[in-house]
Image (cartoon, grey):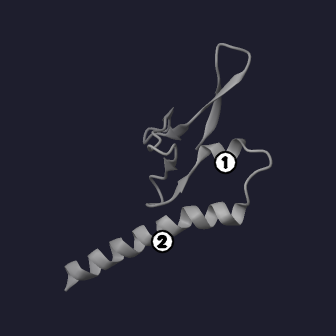
């Protein structure tokens, strides 16, 4: 979950939040490139900067870019699993 939090100022400062195991919103960690990585879908990530762009970036291109890593991670995990089974 990515959600803005109001600051003490009148403007909103975008904060990156995620849901904790206990159900609370906590700060999310971004990687060196500023991307948020899903803890539910291994390899899937999103660049929060995309959400603030006007106009929004092409959804097919950004989805393809994000899912490409997800499929690679899944394939690598499947390959390791298969090797461990033999």
Report x, y in % for residue 68: 52, 68
In the rendered structure, the answer to whether residue 71 lies left or right of residue 51 reads left
Name the residue rendered at 70%, 24% in the picture: 12
Instruction: Return the residue found at the far front.
Output: 33
Choose top left, top right, bottom left or bottom right for residue 79.
bottom left
Position of the N terminus, as image quadrant, is: top right
Report x, y in % for residue 25: 52, 34
Callout 1: SS: helix
Residue at image mark 2 = 71
Disc nearer the start of the sequence (1/2): 1
Instruction: Return the residue found at the far top.
Output: 8
Residue at image mark 1 = 50
Report x, y in % for residue 75: 40, 75
Q: Are marks 1 and 2 in contact (CB under 8 Å)?
A: no
Task: Specify few, some or many for label 2: CA neighbours under 10 Å numbering under 14, 14-19, or 20 or more.
Answer: some
Callout 2: SS: helix
């Amino acid at each position: 979950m990515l959600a803005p939090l109001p600051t003490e100022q009148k403007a909103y400062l975008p904060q990156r939040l995620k849901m904790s195991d206990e159900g609370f919103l906590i700060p999310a960690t971004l990687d060196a490139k500023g991307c948020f990585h899903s803890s539910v879908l291994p390899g899937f990530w999103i660049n929060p900067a995309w959400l603030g762009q006007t106009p929004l970036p092409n959804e097919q291109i950004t989805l393809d870019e994000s899912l490409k890593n997800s499929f690679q991670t899944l394939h690598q995990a499947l390959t390791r699993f298969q090797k461990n089974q033999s």
